[in-house]
Image (cartoon, rainbow, N blue to C red):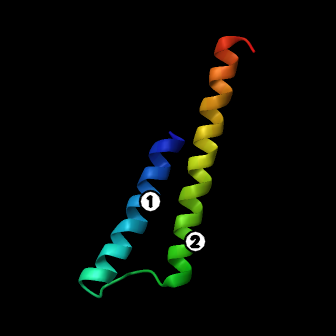
Amino acid sequence: MFLAASFVVFVVYFANVALGAFYDAAFVGDVGEMLILFVATIIFVVAILKKEADRKNKNGS
């Protein structure tokens, strides 16, 4: 779930950057881009940590 959410947030970031680069129609400013990328990174880290915890619990360590 978190991995999919991270992907969705990153797609929003990428779409904003692509629109700004090709069509000069970015819908979020510089600070907004930074915050969106930060949120995508945090969600991705949470997803990886949850997967690691699940793997440890599965192995019994």
Q: How many marks?
A: 2
Query: For mark 1, what is the residue?
Result: 10
Quick one: 5 or 61, which is closer to the camera?
Answer: 61
Residue 25: name its quadrant: bottom left
Q: Is residue 34 above or below residue 5?
A: below
Residue 6 located left or right of residue 58: left
Give the residue pinned by disc 2: 35
Question: Viewer-proximal residue, 8 or 21?
Answer: 21
> Residue 47, located in which quarter of the rendered image?
top right
Residue at x 31% of width, y 74% of height = 18
Classify 10 Å Cα crowding around label 2: few (below 14), some (14-19), many (20 and above).
few
Q: Residue at x 56, y 81 (%)?
A: 31
x then y, percent, for residue 1: 50, 39
Could you say which disc has been placed on residue 57 in the image? none
Q: Position of residue 46 (x, y in %)?
A: 63, 44
Q: Position of residue 36 (x, y in %)?
A: 52, 68
